[in-house]
Image (cartoon, rainbow, N blue to C red):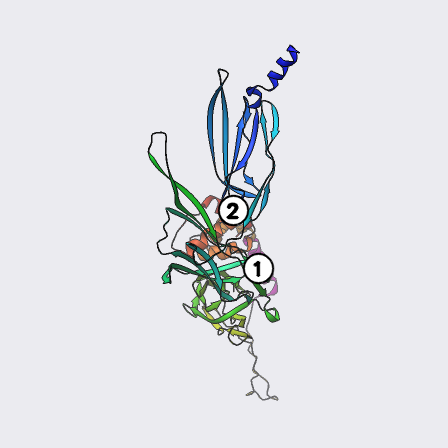
Amino acid sequence: MKNLGKILLIFLSPIYLLASVVATVDSTTVTRGESVTLNLNISGEDIKKPEIDTICGYDVLSTSSQTSITMINGDYKKSYTLSYKFLPLKSCEIQPIEVEIDSKKQKTKPINITVQKQVSNKNSEFVLLLKTDKTEVLVGESFNVDLIFKQKKGASAVDSKFKEPNFKGFWVKNRSDQVIYEDGDFNVIKITYTLSAQREGRLSILPASIAIAKRDSSSRDSWGMLIQDIKWKTYISNALDIDVKPLPNGVKYIGDFKISVDVDKTTINKNEPLNLTLNIFGDGNLEDIQSFKPSIDGVTVYDEKIVIKGNKLTQKMAFVSDNDFIIKPFVLKYFDIKTKKVKVIKTKEIKVKVAGTKVKENLVVKKDTTLNAKAKPNVVVKKGISNTIAIVIFIFGLLVGIGIMLLKPFKMDKNIKKKFDIKNEKLLLIKLLPFKDDVEVKNIIDTLESNIYSVKKKDIDKKILKQIIEKYKI
């Protein structure tokens, strides 16, 4: 019996009881927007702290730890309290958490968290909500969403952290400045977002949130100093569901637009660029409009990326050619939001003259009607050299020509090369364009375009250029 008593004493000793983990929360029932703090109280000799990033499927907002030392039977023992703060948006269950203590794995018990709906009333100090002027729109159609934050007069806050709504699936075309005004007992801040839907279907605008820190209560530290406790509470807005319908007749754009085009000249020299600027003005889904770059036979066209500022879209292009050409009208087809009909707008055709271009004329052979059909023309006979001498002279000239070709090939090549000046960047660009699939050629083309059409100038690697010219026999 004595031995049995010793065994029981060992198993019931405080040292054994210290090897444990217990999970607790500061509250099991919260209002939506209030945070919950999970505490893990761990005791033991050798503890491996768990790595926890999410609780109940929600990200951990902050963590803290506290260490305490107690003396049991003359021995000092450590215990830890690990705290994890998270923000549950709906009721959930905190699953058991496994912790390894003294080489043994132990688990906590599950904890149920109840999240109650956040109710705004006249007595609420803070209110956050979303409002929209339309709940049903077409793809690309603009509509407004108002974010409204109300703070009751006299309510104070130590700090705040604001998180905008999630506009996934929408273009944010504009965000207004804050508008501040009074509404009864509240000071109000309003921000208006102008949006347009990117695709059809039922899309949701997820809630905005604002976390507000307030002084909760006072306590004293170990030195007797007064400490103000701070408590955070998150206020969450409502969500918005938007029904997005497809555009009719396969039209891609919607709004109210005007189109114009400007060119710096209509007569250019060979290999001289003609600069064109295309502008589209109006309200609509400018963000969806794609490049207007045309394809014209015998003309090299360079286009810049589309730039959108407010309700204006701009695209710049450059045209280079050796011959006259025509720039056909730029066309925009869209659904007019005012008339509810499909509308087509376009620019005028532009004819470009390239100076130095020779006009081909048809060769017309006219008969001399002054001669009488019966009359015989006068024939003048000149004495010439004999056929034998002519053949000898021809053969001699041919041999001399072949000899010159064989003896001085390098001199002739040199003279031919002089006709092509690599310092003429525009001409060089045109010569290289057929070989742009070559990476080295593409790099030189990019440099030439930058030098010709922008202010910045870059040096070209002459060694590589020489190799390319020899490679493609330019």
Estimate the x, y position of residue 269 in percent, counting from the top left: 43, 65
Q: What element carries label 2?
A: strand
Q: Which amino acid does label 2 sit on?
A: Val
**What segment carries the magenta color?**
383-401
**Relative to residue 370, is residue 68 drawn left or right?**
left
Q: Which residue in the protein does label 2 denote?
A: 30
Question: Which residue shows up at 53% across the image and 75% down it?
Answer: 361
Question: Which residue shows up at 49% across the image and 23% down it?
Answer: 78
Q: Is mark 1 on a helix, strand or loop?
A: strand
Question: Which residue shows up at 57% across the image and 59% down it?
Answer: 203
Estimate the x, y position of residue 253 in percent, counting from the top left: 54, 67
Q: Which residue in the protein does label 1 denote?
A: 203
Q: Residue 308 carries which label?
A: none
- 422 or 78, which is in the foreground? 78
Rate crowding at label 2 as few (under 14), some (14 to 19) or many (20 or more) other CA atoms within 10 Å.
Answer: many
Is 102 one of the magenta-colored residues?
no
Q: In which quarter of the image is the N terminus?
A: top right
- 361 or 267, which is in the foreground? 267
> Residue lying furthest top in this view?
2
